[in-house]
Amino acid sequence: RILCVFPYSGRSHYQMFEVICRGLAERGHRIDMIGHFPTKNSIANYTDIIDLSKDAKSVVNSLTVDFAKHIGLWVTYYQSTKFGSALCDLMGTEDMQKFIKNPPNDPPYDLVITEYFGSPCYLGFGTLLNAPVVVGISFMHMPYVDDFMANPFSYASFSNLYTDKPVIETFTDRLWNFIVNYWEMQKFYSYTSNQNEIMKKYLGLSDIPDVRELEKTVSLALVNSHYSYHGIKPITPAVVEVGGLHIIDRDQKISSELKNWLDSADHGLVYFTLGSLMAIESLPREALLAFYASFAKIAPVKVLVKCSNTTKLPPGLPSNVMTLPWIQQIAVLRHKNTRVFITHGGLMGTQEALYYGIPMIGIPVFYDQTKNVRIMINKNMAWMLNHENINEETVDAALNALLKDPKYRESAKRNSRMFRDRPMSAKETAMYWIEYVIRNGPDSLRSPAVVLPWWKRKMLDVFAFLIVCFVLAIIVSVLLLGILFKAFCKYKRDNEMEKKVK
């Protein structure tokens, strides 16, 4: 019996974790879900026991581009407070308190799965239910996850979350990579330290360890990353890369309107969306008009735009453009007529473009988006537009390059093959290692280094000892040489005096 707890209301995040929990139910495990998106298609063994959407505002289509830029300046603060500590308060809702005070125990839970996204307070459910904890991470390797999972830090060669540059090349790159990631990690620890009291308050466990200690008890971390995308780094067995886990490559039921638009795009289709959080209509009017003009020029190529409120768009939408408030993105990207994907550069959408081999035009605004787009540029399958300076000329250049130059599509297909080339699918990989923990116990993958203080983990005491030994050896050698030199000088003087006496 497994408890899945996902307090964050971002739909793109939930896609990843829904695949995990539904997949476990399909394999015969009994799943109890606490989240914001109750399933519409019921399956055996899967029960939505608490719907958090009644108590928390959805973030779907809730961000303007300007506000997203503001978040970008304070990303760790927002992640740790608005998307972190505030989520801990959901433990205090009526339904959650009923569950916490009287959790099901017939049978008891064998495992807890939760998202680690600024709210480590939910690790306390493992202590409450006396069950191992598996965390899902919807981004790439975060420095604080590397820290509590005892992953080796790879600042010299691996560009981490908070560094936009995809490849570390110079001394300056290494210095900046270290400073930024260490600073952001310490800020995250500081901002989330108040969750200790929140967790104790709502779970009713006065003697529960603090969140920093609970992090060290995590049995498995499933990370939305893959070495063919983010790069190669050393990881412990308890950290498993499942990049692209949310991608279910099968036909989806779509509206006849969308199907007809896709099927009739014989000259190709450009798909434009800023994801589930940001609204396209919040772009500056000048930018939207630039897109209008450029889209009109590429006809008969068709354009599909996700826009939740078309009344906020300026008039004059070209005839080769169709807008819909919600679009099944994978169905569009896997369609044979899709040629270009215009995106904000979110990790999920970028992975989907990589999986299906679709060249991208990236318009990054905040968080990891710039990094994701630059990774794709480095793979020669993307262009980037500055969201603060979008004009007809820059949009024309990007569209013409990706639609007319075959090298981008060829590179996209080559990188797609590499991303897909795995011994097991991302979903099968996640299922295997979760069941491994259930079969073999909570400590079966955990590194012994998690209990070591950082200075022992870095072998600083050993290096200090060796340096002291080296310095002492030099000092002793110098003293011995001094003694020998004095003895030699004395012998020489005595020898000369004997000669004079004779």
Image: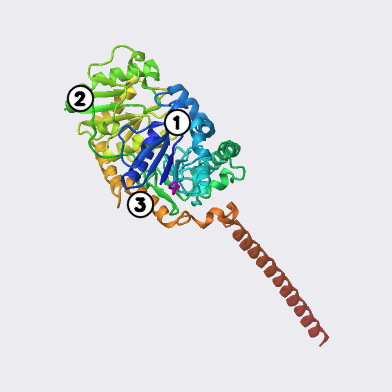
> Looking at the image, can residue 364 be seen?
yes
Q: Amino acid at mark 1?
A: Leu
Residue nearer the viewer, 182 or 389:
182
Single out the residue that lies furthest toward the top. 315
Single out the residue that lies furthest toward the front. 106
Q: Horizontally, is 247 left or right of 140 in the view? A: left
Label placed on residue 220: none
How would you rate the neighbour count of disc 3 (Cα within 10 Å): few for under 14, some for 14-19, many for 20 or more?
some
Q: Horizontally, is 409 left or right of 181 in the view? A: left
Q: Amino acid at mark 3?
A: Tyr
Residue nearer the viewer, 190 or 45:
45
Label placed on residue 52: 1
Q: Which residues are magenta?
A: 106-110
* Cα gap from disc 3 to disc 1, whole angstroms: 29 Å
* Cα gap from disc 1 to disc 2, whole angstroms: 33 Å
Residue at screen point 39% across, 54% down? 436
Q: Majority secondary structure of the magenta segment?
A: loop
Q: Which residue is mark 2?
A: 256
Asked if the residue under mark 1 is in contact with the one under mark 3, i.e. CB atoms within 8 Å, the reply is: no
Residue 9, quarter of the rendered image: top left
Q: Amino acid at mark 2?
A: Ser
Q: Is residue 18 magenta?
A: no
First in residue order: circle 2 vs circle 3: 2
Residue 348, percent across and down?
36, 36
Residue 196, quarter of the rendered image: top right
Q: Which residue is mark 3?
A: 432
Asked if the residue under mark 2 is in contact with the one under mark 1, i.e. CB atoms within 8 Å, the reply is: no
> Looking at the image, can residue 171 be seen?
no
Q: Nearer the viewer, mark 1 or mark 2?
A: 1
Residue 149, percent across and down?
50, 50
